[in-house]
């Protein structure tokens, strides 16, 4: 499924790094930065997470709540969040429901070998639960600047 700007964001219910339930409806009337990334503790994903961490106050000042999502489990997320002092929740999508609902589970290629993985993509969700922006060409070192 291809999501487009203006569409309702797919609802989700999962757990964060602490095993607490998190639902999209928890953020009604708030702006959400929902960013999908391939894997905890990998170089590019760490660069991206740390860029969001370093600019977290300015994102909050603009009214955004930041949520990271990967197919890693809550235990992996907790280690990643703690190691890099990330101030936002990381959501467990080990069931791969969210990556499928948001259309970011795609065929990728590395060293000539095809495999399925998460496309690094960020969805900006407005106060009404609609997708207001989709960032497909994420620049990990300056990702927070890409978020309008």
Image (tube, rainbow, N blue to C red):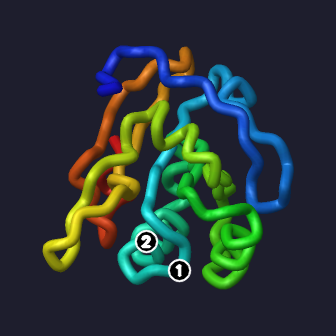
Q: Position of residue 125 (x, y in %)?
A: 48, 29
Q: Determine the residue positioned at 32% across, 56% down.
A: 145
Q: From where the camera sits, is residue 61 visible?
A: yes
- Residue receiving disc 2: 45
Lateral position of residue 17 relative to residue 137, left or right: right
Kind of element beneath mark 1:
loop
Q: In which image quadrant can residue 118 be found?
A: bottom left
- Which label belongs to residue 41? 1
Q: Furthest-left residue in view?
A: 112
Tell me if mark 1 has few (under 14), some (14-19) or many (20+) residues whose alpha carbon lies within 10 angstroms of its own.
Answer: some
Q: Determine the residue positioned at 22% across, 53% down.
A: 137
Q: Position of residue 24 (x, y in %)?
A: 65, 30
Q: Position of residue 52 (x, y in %)?
A: 48, 63
Tell me if mark 2 has few (under 14), some (14-19) or many (20+) residues whose alpha carbon lies within 10 angstroms of its own.
Answer: some
- Which label belongs to residue 131? none
36 over 110 or under it: above or below: above
Q: In which image quadrant can residue 6 be found?
A: top left
Q: From where the camera sits, is residue 63 visible?
A: no
Q: Determine the residue positioned at 39% across, 15% down.
A: 7
How many circles with numbers are drawn on the protein? Answer: 2
Image quarter hosting the C terminus: top left
**Frontmost residue, 70 versus 65:** 70
**Frontmost residue, 128 versus 39:** 39
Image quarter hosting the N terminus: top left
Kind of element beneath mark 2:
helix
Lateral position of residue 66 relative to residue 26, left or right: left
Q: Determine the residue positioned at 54% across, 37% down.
A: 32
Q: Position of residue 17 (x, y in %)?
A: 75, 61
The CA span between labels 1 and 2 is 7 Å
Quick check: marks 1 and 2 in contact, CB under 8 Å? yes
């Amino acid at each position: 499924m291809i999501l487009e700007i203006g569409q309702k964001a797919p609802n989700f219910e999962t757990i964060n790094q602490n095993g607490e339930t998190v639902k999209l409806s928890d953020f009604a009337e708030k702006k959400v930065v929902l960013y999908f990334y391939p894997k905890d503790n990998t170089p590019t994903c760490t660069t991206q997470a740390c860029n969001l961490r370093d600019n977290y106050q300015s994102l909050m000042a603009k009214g955004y709540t930041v949520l990271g999502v990967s197919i890693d489990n809550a235990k992996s997320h907790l280690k990643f969040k703690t190691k890099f002092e990330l101030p936002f929740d990381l959501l467990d999508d080990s069931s791969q429901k969210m990556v499928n609902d948001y259309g970011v589970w795609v065929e990728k290629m590395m060293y000539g070998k095809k495999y399925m993985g998460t496309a690094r993509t960020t969805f900006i969700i407005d106060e009404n639960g609609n997708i207001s922006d989709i960032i497909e060409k994420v620049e990990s070192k300056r990702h927070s600047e890409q978020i309008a």
